Image (tube, coloured by chain):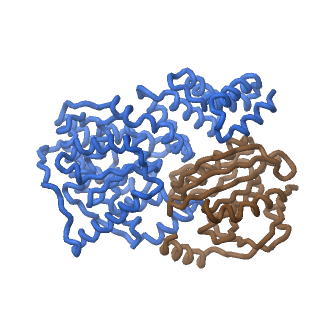
Chain colours: A blue, B brown
Amino acid sequence: MKRRDLLAGGAACWACSLVHSAWAQTPADLDYAMPDRLTQPDPASDEGGLWALMDREERSLRRSPFAVRDGGLKAYVQDVACRLGGDHCPDLRIHLVRTPVFNATMSPNGMMQLWTGLLLRIENEAQLAAVVGHEIGHYLQRHTVDRLRDIKARSAFGQFLGLFGLAGAVGQLAVLASAFAYSRDHEREADRIGAILMHQAGYDVAEASRVWGNLLDELKARGQDPELISPLFATHPAPPERRETLAAYAAALPGGSAGDAAYETGTGRFLDEWLDDEVKRAQYAETLVLLSRLLTRRSGQGVIHLHRGDVYRLRGEKGDVDLAMADYQAAIRSADAPPRAYRGIGLTARQLGQKTEAVAALSRYLELAPDAPDARLIGTYVAELR
Amino acid sequence: MNKLLVVALAVVLAACATVRKVESGSRPVGERMTMTIEGDWNHLDYPGIRPAQIWTMEGVTIDEFLIYSGIRDGQVMHPETPASSQKKNIVFRSNMQIEDVVAMFEGLLTRDGSTFRVISVEPYPFAGGQGFRFEYERIRKVDNVQQRGVGFGAVDRGELFALIYQAPRLTFFPRHKDRVEAIARTVSIR
Ligand SMILES: [Zn+2]
């Protein structure tokens, strides 16, 4: 068995649990006592074998070039886990993985993975706590893999040839996630425990349901009803029900803070890189919904306008040129005015035949970013326009 | 390269792909492009690779030489499969500028979750006219291999012609880079 596949499936849960919902009744049991710290099960048992496998996977993850190694960011997220997990804090190890997809996974040995596409979409510390608390719920209850399907060979092949359009690794992971998903009852239990842990740690539980609402908005932007997008959605209760369940928990567990400022401070300097990765997905309709939502943040406006301008410029549909230009102009008026916004203005003006504006903006870009990878291309454009 | 991957690849290649040798000399690719190669390449063909051709020196799990010849306005680049059909396809448009073409390849080459970082982009002669050249680094998601890549191309009468070569950055990319540069210099479009 290939370890990575087992991990991708066995541990996947937050994204796939999008398909498990169906519980819109008023929650009854809002007390939860954490178990004592967990110990490694007998290696001869199934669970012990999985645990050992996950330990090996964790060692390889530490060496992976996709692992985010920034100490400050890791410490920030780990602190949130410790606020939620209490005595279990030393056993919960959070790994951040650079992949522009919304997903989180939990392994029975205490290894949690959060993908950067999730961190990009989270709006505040309470929403982060909602995801992390849910995963901790699986861990504390020792939820085990409910279903296994033998699709490993297929997925390995699909990942390798993903570039050529047979199937992307990322899409494949989603398929794996659904194949290895926790049971619906386990997802419900993790949601309940997550909400209680959030509340105990002083977070506003209402933010948990907003995570789902935001995801739904992006899915709808694909131009399809979320329930029709995938067979998974068609055969399971709709995500809105889950959002409602979490909203019901919030009503029963009022108070707490959202922690917007703390989240932006903790993650803000990665916004540019995560947005770069997001724009490269070339899924412009969804990304536009995300970017417009991100503009409600308190910081990073320039970087967000820059990327929305790039999305319009790259999409190139009717009217997009004007929208791109407006965003680039907004970007250079922002406090964080990124140099690449001048590049965007210059490239857009060049396409519109506005030579003077193009020369001015592209020259400014080269002044601010002389070592940019495209400096020679832009330099040639300036020379041709003069 | 892990064993399972190689086995899976071998099984599928046996089922639906063909490999044939491309020998030194002048080789037409598509209707309008011709290029001259030195040394033998292996041309791998299977349905999912179109509209490109893929050639390899060391084996397709190691190095990949992607050849695009005469891609038309509105043509889909490596269509998404039903399994991932909820995603929008990446499409070539004939009014794309150099930076747009590079962004398009960036989108294609990260679709499997790999990272991609442009190192340089510059105007560059191609097929007797003005084209472009770019270099990049890529970390392949499936096996964490650190690759280096180079691309050449031009849009000629509304059609895209491009060559992309990528290979592990320490051994194989340096070994074959000059060979690929030489091929790029021999491209002619009629
Ligand atoms: Zn879950």
Place of residue A335 in the rendered image (x, y in percent of width and height, measured from the top left): 50, 22
The number of discs equals 0
Residue most toward the top?
A333
From the top left corner, tell me how far across and down residue B150 is, in percent. 69, 54
Which image quarter: residue A12? bottom left
Q: Quadrant of residue B71?
A: bottom right
Tell me if A234 is positioned left or right of A195 in this view: right
What residue do we see at 80% from left, 60% from top?
B182
Q: What residue is drawn where x is 69% and y is 37%?
A: A375
Judge whether residue B185 can be spotted in this image.
Answer: yes
Kindly indicate the quadrant of the structure image that contains residue A205.
Answer: top left
Q: Please name whichever residue, B25 or A243, is drawn nearer the observer in this view of the structure.
A: B25
Q: Residue at x 25, y 30 (%)?
A: A257
Instruction: Say above or below: B181 vs A201.
Output: below
Q: Quadrant of the C terminus of chain A?
A: top right
Residue A87 horizontal/vertical position (percent): 17, 48
Q: Tell me the quarter of the image containing the N terminus of chain A.
A: bottom left
Can see residue A216? no
Could you tell me which residue is drawn at 19 percent across and 51 percent down? Answer: A88
Considering depth in this image, is B87 or A268 the residue closer to the camera? A268
Q: Is residue A218 left or right of residue B96?
A: left
Residue B151, image x and y in percent?
A: 71, 53
Give above or below for B164 relative to A87: below
